[in-house]
Image (cartoon, rainbow, N blue to C red):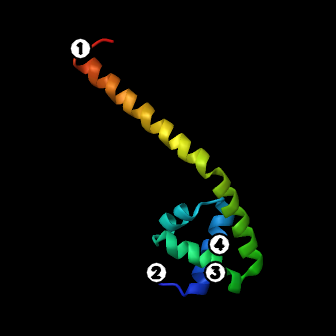
Amino acid sequence: MRWNADERCVQLGRYIVENAATVRAAAKMYGISKSTVHKDVTVRLRETDRILHGKVLRVLEENKTQRHLRGGMATKRKYEELARIRQEAQAAHGFRE
């Protein structure tokens, strides 16, 4: 579906505010690039709907403050999964610690 830029930026802004979504999540949801989402909600939306623009900026700022926590949790899950796979492989081959 092709949207004009004004419709798209308002739709993206609403999605981000209603779901406390990240730019990455919005891009994935709508099948467009992160850079397009970012430009739409930070530049175009300011000209189209200033109130929504302010709400989006608050959500994006909150996401930014939590970014390091999400990254740490992702790393933790990665290494837990690797440990689980290693244990399963050892068990399948009869190895013991």
Q: Is residue 77 left or right of residue 83?
A: right
Alpha carbon distance from label 1 to label 3: 59 Å
Mark 2 to mark 1: distance in Å?
55 Å
Front position among marks 2 and 4: 4
Instruction: Please rate how many residues cluster around mark 4, counting C-alpha atoms within 10 Å: few if below 14, some from 14 to 19, many from 20.
Output: many
Report which residue position mark 3 lands on.
43
User: In the current view of this chain or complex, which residue is farthest to the top?
Assistant: 96
Q: Nearer the viewer, residue 58 or 91?
A: 58
Q: Spot the residue most to the right.
A: 51
The mark closer to the camera, 3 or 4, is 3
Residue kind at label 3, given as amino acid type: Val
Q: Which residue is mark 2?
A: 1
Cα–Cα gap, marks 3 and 4: 11 Å
Q: Please tell me how crowded label 2 is: few (under 14), some (14-19), or many (20+) other residues with Cα within 10 Å.
A: few
Question: x, y percentage for residue 9?
Answer: 61, 79
- Whether the residues at callouts 2 and 3 have beta carbons within 8 Å, the answer is no
Q: Is residue 57 above or below residue 78?
A: below
Q: Nearer the viewer, mark 2 or mark 1?
A: 1
Mark 3 or 4, nearer chain start: 4
Name the amino acid, label 2. Met
